[in-house]
């Protein structure tokens, strides 16, 4: 692929997540009727450095993890539910939602506002290990129903080559923690070398 010459410089400032406007959702009812759900972005960037991912190659302003305040995230959920009359079934489209404490903060804020929502999100396996079995059950009761995480391989050498910061046994522990909490686990395809070495 030919490189572009004289690329325009990146702007010096970027919209911070807390400055994001609520999305216009005029067609959300039709979208949901066809099987869709409410998609919300609560952060930008990722703290991972996976060798196969494009995010770590982005300019620093775009790849560094920046989280939106949970209160604003819940504001947007409530705005969509009350403004468009839809069921609060939410899919977070972040590269990484954040650490375990941020999920707990989301569940608590939803409960504080008496807003019952079912939500799915993307987490890094290393962060999933922090929560106890009882904490995962509490999150499930609070609305967390699905988790997507990368399980590209259970081969320790492959994980090291791909710059994944967890060991094979830790990946399996993260799955078990979700299962023990009653959460349906979604994961990416497992490498053919799974279990080898």
Image: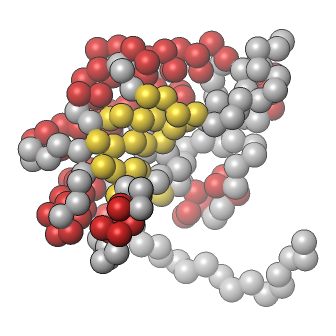
Q: Is residue 164 visible?
A: no
Q: Which corner quadrant of the image does residue 11 belong to?
A: bottom right
Q: Residue at x 68, y 86 (%)?
A: 8
Q: Is residue 176 left or right of residue 4?
A: left
Q: In the image as oriented, which residue stretches furthest toward the right? A: 2
Q: Residue at x 54, y 64 (%)?
A: 61
Q: Which corner quadrant of the image does residue 193 belong to?
A: top right
Q: Which corner quadrant of the image does residue 68 belong to?
A: bottom left
The one nearer the camera, 155 or 58, is: 155
Q: In the image as oriented, which residue stretches furthest toward the front? A: 34
Q: Residue at x 76, y 20 (%)?
A: 194
Q: Position of residue 30 (x, y in %)?
A: 35, 69
Q: Relative to 52, does residue 57 appear above or below in the rendering? A: below
The one nearer the camera, 21 or 115, is: 115
Which quarter shows the C terminus? top right
Q: Position of residue 170 (x, y in %)?
A: 58, 16
Q: Residue at x 53, y 54 (%)?
A: 45
Which quarter shows the N terminus? bottom right
Q: Position of residue 145 (x, y in %)?
A: 36, 34
Q: Is residue 48 visible?
A: yes
Q: Relative to 78, does residue 9 appear above or below in the rendering? A: below
- Colouring rule applied to residues: secondary structure
The one nearer the camera, 13 or 44, is: 44
Q: Is residue 31 left or right of residue 70?
A: right
């Amino acid at each position: 692929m030919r490189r572009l010459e004289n690329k325009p410089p990146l702007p010096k400032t970027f919209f911070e997540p807390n400055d994001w406007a609520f999305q216009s959702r005029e067609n959300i009812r039709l979208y949901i009727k066809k099987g869709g759900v409410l998609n919300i972005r609560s952060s930008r960037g990722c703290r991972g450095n996976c060798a196969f991912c494009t995010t770590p190659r982005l300019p620093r302003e775009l790849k560094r993890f920046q989280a939106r305040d949970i209160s604003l995230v819940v504001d947007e959920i409530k705005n969509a539910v009350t403004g468009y009359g839809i069921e609060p079934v939410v899919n977070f489209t972040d590269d990484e939602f954040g650490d375990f404490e941020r999920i707990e903060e989301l569940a608590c804020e939803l409960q504080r506002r008496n807003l019952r929502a079912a939500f799915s999100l993307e987490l890094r396996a290393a962060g999933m290990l922090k929560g106890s079995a009882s904490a995962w059950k509490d999150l499930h009761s609070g609305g967390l129903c699905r988790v997507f995480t990368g399980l590209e391989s259970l081969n320790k050498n492959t994980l090291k080559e791909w710059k994944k910061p967890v060991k094979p046994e830790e990946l399996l522990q993260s799955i078990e923690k979700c299962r023990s909490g009653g959460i349906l686990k979604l994961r990416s395809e497992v490498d053919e070398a799974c279990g080898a070495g």
